[in-house]
Image: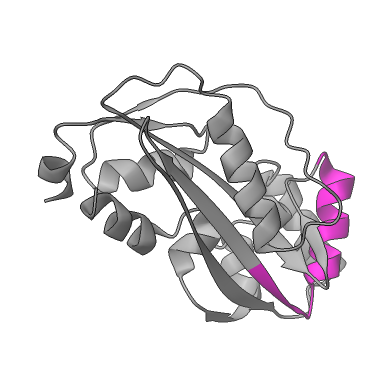
Amino acid sequence: MLKQKLKPYNVILASGSPRRHQFFKDLDIDFSIQLKEIEEIYPKELKGIEITDFLANLKSKAFTDLQEKDVLITSDTIVWLEGKALGKPKDAKDAFTMLKALSGKKHEVITSISIKSLSFQKIINDVTTVSFKELSDDEINYYINNYKPFDKAGAYGIQEWIGYIGIENIAGSYFNVVGLPVHKLYKELMNL
C-alpha cells in the first residue's frame, strides 16, 4: 500500500540506525540510505521536543542537493529525564551513569521526524513515557557488558534484555522507544 503511494518518489533515509532501516523494510518502502556528518549540538535553552525538532531539522539542512522527486527523512531521539536530555553514551562509564539515573524512575522518550522535499518540510514528533524498576549495579553492568548500548539514546534498547527485565510500564508507542514512531510516519507518508 505505502510502496505504491511512494512509487513516484525517491525516499532517502538519513540514518545509520539498523532499527530504523528495519522499520523502513518492514513498511515495504523502497529507500536509499544517505548519511551526512553533522555535529549534533543544540541551543542550551531548548527543552524536550524542541531539542529533537531542532536536531531533526538540522540533519535535514545538511542535504543541500535534493532533487525534484526526493523525499528526505531525518530523525532524532532523546531520553528526557528530570529536565535533562540523555543522548547516546560516550562509553561504558557514561552508559552506567545514565542507566543508574533512569533506575526506579519514569522518563520520556521523544522522537522528531523531518519529512522534506524541495517544496515542503514537515516535522512530526512523538512522546512515550517509560518506567524502569530499580536496577541493581550488577544488572546495569551485565547489560552494558553484553549488549554495548552505545548507539542508543539513554543507553538502552527496550527490545533488549534490559527492557525485558527492567521496564515496568510504558505509555505510548513502543516503536517510538525502539527509535521511530512508525504509525505517525506511515500516516504522513500516506498523505504525500
Q: Residue at x 52, y 38 (%)?
A: 17
15 and 99: which is toward the camera: 15
- Residue 29 lies in what quarter of the image? top left
- Residue 56 lies in what quarter of the image? top right
Which residue is most to the front? Answer: 119
Q: Classify 144 as above or below 11.
A: below
Residue 112 in the image: x percent, y percent? 54, 54
Q: Classify 42 as above or below 45.
A: above
Q: Is residue 159 visible?
A: no
**Is residue 95 magenta-colored?**
yes
Q: Classify 19 as above or below 182.
A: above
Residue 10 in the image: x percent, y percent? 26, 27
Count the numbered circles shown: 0
Q: Is residue 101 visible?
A: yes
Q: Residue at x 76, y 62 (%)?
A: 47
**Is residue 101 magenta-colored?**
yes
164 and 17: which is toward the camera: 17
Residue 15 in the image: x percent, y percent? 50, 34
Q: Residue at x 36, y 55 (%)?
A: 185
37 and 20: which is toward the camera: 37
Q: Residue at x 23, y 33 (%)?
A: 30
Region rendered in magenta = 90-108
Residue 150 in the image: x percent, y percent? 71, 42
Colour scheme in use: one colour
Q: In the figure, is residue 1 to the left or right of 11?
A: left
Q: In the figure, is residue 178 to the left or right of 154?
A: left
Which residue is most to the top? Answer: 65
Q: Classify 8 as above or below 181.
A: above
